[in-house]
Amino acid sequence: MKRAFAVEHLSIAFQDKNEPLQTVVSDVSFSIGLGKGKSEIVGVVGESGSGKSMTALAAMGLLKDNARVLQGAIWLEEQNLLSLNAKELSRVQGSEMSMIFQEPMTSLNPLMRIGEQVGESLFLHPGHGAKLSKKEIRRQVLKALEEVGLENAERVYRQFPHELSGGQRQRVMIAQAMINQPKLLIADEPTTALDVMVQEQILELLRRLHREKGVSILFISHDLAVIEKICSRVLVMYQGQIVEEGAVSQVLHHPKHEYTRTLVERFPRFIAPPRSKQNVLTLRDVSVFYRERKAERSGAQRREIVHHANLEIREGEILGLVGESGSGKSTLAKAIVGLNPQYEGEILMQPDLQPQMVFQDPFGSLNPAHTIGWILSEPLRIIGIKSAKERKERVLQMLENMGLSKDFYNRYARELSGGQRQRVSIGAALLRDSKLLVADEPVSALDVTVQSQILQLLLEVHRQNGLSILFISHDLNLVRHICHRVAVMYQGEIVEIGDAQEIYRSPKHPYTRRLLQVENMNL
């Protein structure tokens, strides 16, 4: 097993109280070369529950208490990680192998400064028994922060996680994972929550670390375009098993397994243009801002996020809104649906429009203390339907329309998968009979199969109800396939707007050209 990471015949199961044993990984085997001349980047794709993250967590010793390894071995060179005790495994974690996650905000301690957190791994794994001084740890941490492209490392060293952007936090996680120069880096959906510009920067950083440091990377993702950009080989997992593996170009362009073909064919076809030229929403010179409490007390000027936006959404139109993190997309969306009343200019709507919003992570917008039935019934009660029986009938019908069975009525949000929660969120928005849906990154946190299902659902309700949709996304390829027109935001301004196909063929603004150049890079 020299110079390799190898998973051999691994099977993992869950067993909750009074529940039968549920196998989630079944007889999985693969290997990754390690070290100079043998290191590689191997991708793993598959839908939620396919076992890809579970395999990685088993390797890191991070399985939950109700998980059991039924059989198999996980080798890091000549060490079987599954046979190590907690103390022995802790020597390997963070030194010989490390892991970075999709959302660093849940992995970084909000009460610790960045310098402390990155340096903690050096304190635990100083290397070769040498005890490093505080001065040396600080020096190595600053160097690690600089190596991952964080500007002004001294300032970042002193900051807390909430003071950094998503892309900066992900760079911190990579610095923390790489500071001991591990042989293997496991990256579990590390770019899913990032916009296209930051995503490309993180991918380039990982490529550079692989090239310059010789680290091997196990890259887990549901995004085939990302897999194609960074990986040389790919494993396709389905229902706990590897159903196909091989060179990325072979698997993605000439898939053999039926499931792989469904992944490759995930994008819906372009839809017919809307017939009506009438607007459901018009923005005229809209500027959106925030006032912080300190600013209000001191009389300081407001912080303006969106500057003089002009926009129209027509009846039955799907309008895409794209731009990088911090460009103002979500801030503008919140002003449209009434979640941020601090704006100037005009937001004009058709009478009784009441636009509804679907968020990226529906778990944050679904009340965890109430059942799905209650959550969906509440909008109906608010609009004046007093009969509990009528509300329940309409909710059950909406569940069916969303592709969910009636027993979901009595479930809680925590008992649902990401795709199921997103269906509930869309159903809740539609129950208000609104003609405008504002969808803020509604599929970016979902795996490719569920993503496709949710998109097809949105397109179906759009077709049946004549729904207008403002579709916010950082996935330009996705926007191109499902939107009629596209608006591009940059630093709080709408810098370009037009027919989706025309903008992709002939972008006018330099920022739009740069976005498309990044999107098409390595494809």
Image: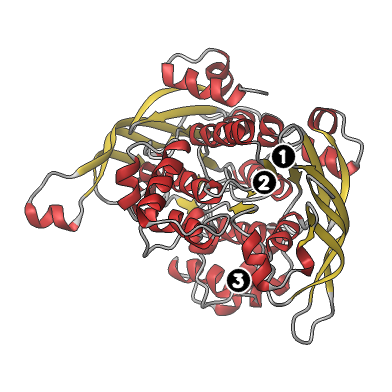
SS label for mark 3:
helix
- Please say if the residues under marks 1 and 2 sit with CB atoms less than 8 Å apart: yes
Viewer-closest of 223 and 287:
223
Amino acid carrying mark 3 in the image = Arg
Amino acid carrying mark 2 in the image = Lys
Measured in 3D between alpha carbons, the distance from the residue under mark 2 to the one under mark 3, in whole angstroms, is: 36 Å
Q: Residues within 10 Å of mark 1 (few under 14, many from 20)?
A: some
Q: Earlier in the sequence, mark 2 or mark 3?
A: 2
Note whether 474 is above or below 238 in the view shown. above
Q: Which residue is mark 2?
A: 183
Q: Residues within 10 Å of mark 3 (few under 14, many from 20)?
A: some
SS label for mark 2:
loop
Measured in 3D between alpha carbons, the distance from the residue under mark 1 to the one under mark 2, in whole angstroms, is: 7 Å
Note whether 417 is above or below 300 in the view shown. below
Q: Which residue is mark 1?
A: 35
Q: Earlier in the sequence, mark 1 or mark 2?
A: 1
Q: Residues within 10 Å of mark 2 (few under 14, many from 20)?
A: many
Residue 288 location, x and y as percent?
A: 27, 42
- The residue lying at 84 percent from left, 41 percent from top is 260
- The residue lying at 88 percent from left, 43 percent from top is 244
Q: Which residue is mark 3?
A: 414
Side (left or right) of 210 relative to 42:
left
Side (left or right) of 12 relative to 487:
right
